[in-house]
């Protein structure tokens, strides 16, 4: 079997060179001159190098057991509103949070205000 040859574009080589210079703490102006990349590209590459720590974002309002109880409650009674779920499960969040969670798991709730009830006509 032959060796696999990977071709990289000139632009990709410039990015690799810029990343190397960023690691070496070279001033941006010198990086711009050497690589001929745009200032925005170099700033983006610098920013990507400093990744966020795992778990450094905002804490979730609902934990796993609360999410599971919402799913179970909806399976048994799909006509509950998010406000009903918050009340019945005594959740420490707003009904908007529950609505967002239901939407995230591909469920939706439709408000039917102002519609007339069906009649015999």
Image (cartoon, grey):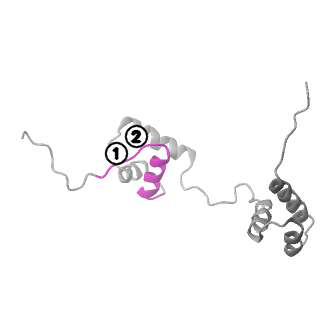
Q: Which residue is mark 2?
A: 74
Direction left: furthest residue: 121
Image x and y of residue 21, in percent: 90, 64
Q: How crowded is the residue under tag 2: few (<14 C-alpha within 10 Å), some, or many (20+)?
A: some
Q: In this figure, what is the number of numbered marks?
A: 2
Q: Nearer the viewer, residue 49 or 35?
A: 35
Direction right: furthest residue: 24
Q: Quadrant of the C terminus?
A: top left
Q: Which residue is mark 1?
A: 80
Q: Is 34 located above or below residue 71 in the figure?
A: below
Q: Nearer the viewer, residue 81 or 42?
A: 42
Image x and y of residue 18, in percent: 86, 62
Magenta-highlighted residues: 93-111
Q: Quadrant of the N terminus?
A: top right
Q: Nearer the viewer, residue 115 or 86?
A: 115
Q: Is 76 located above or below residue 117 in the figure?
A: above
């Amino acid at each position: 079997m032959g060796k696999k040859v990977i071709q990289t574009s000139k632009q990709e080589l410039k990015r690799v060179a810029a990343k190397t210079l960023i690691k070496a703490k070279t001033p941006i102006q010198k990086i711009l001159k050497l690589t001929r990349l745009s200032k925005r590209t170099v700033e983006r590459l610098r920013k990507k190098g400093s990744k966020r720590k795992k778990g450094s974002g905002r804490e979730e309002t609902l934990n796993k057991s609360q999410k599971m109880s919402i799913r179970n409650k909806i399976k048994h009674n799909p006509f509950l509103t998010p406000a009903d779920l918050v009340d019945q499960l005594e959740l420490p969040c707003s009904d908007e949070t529950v609505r967002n969670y239901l939407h995230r798991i591909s469920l939706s709730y439709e408000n039917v205000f102002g519609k007339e009830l069906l009649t015999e006509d």
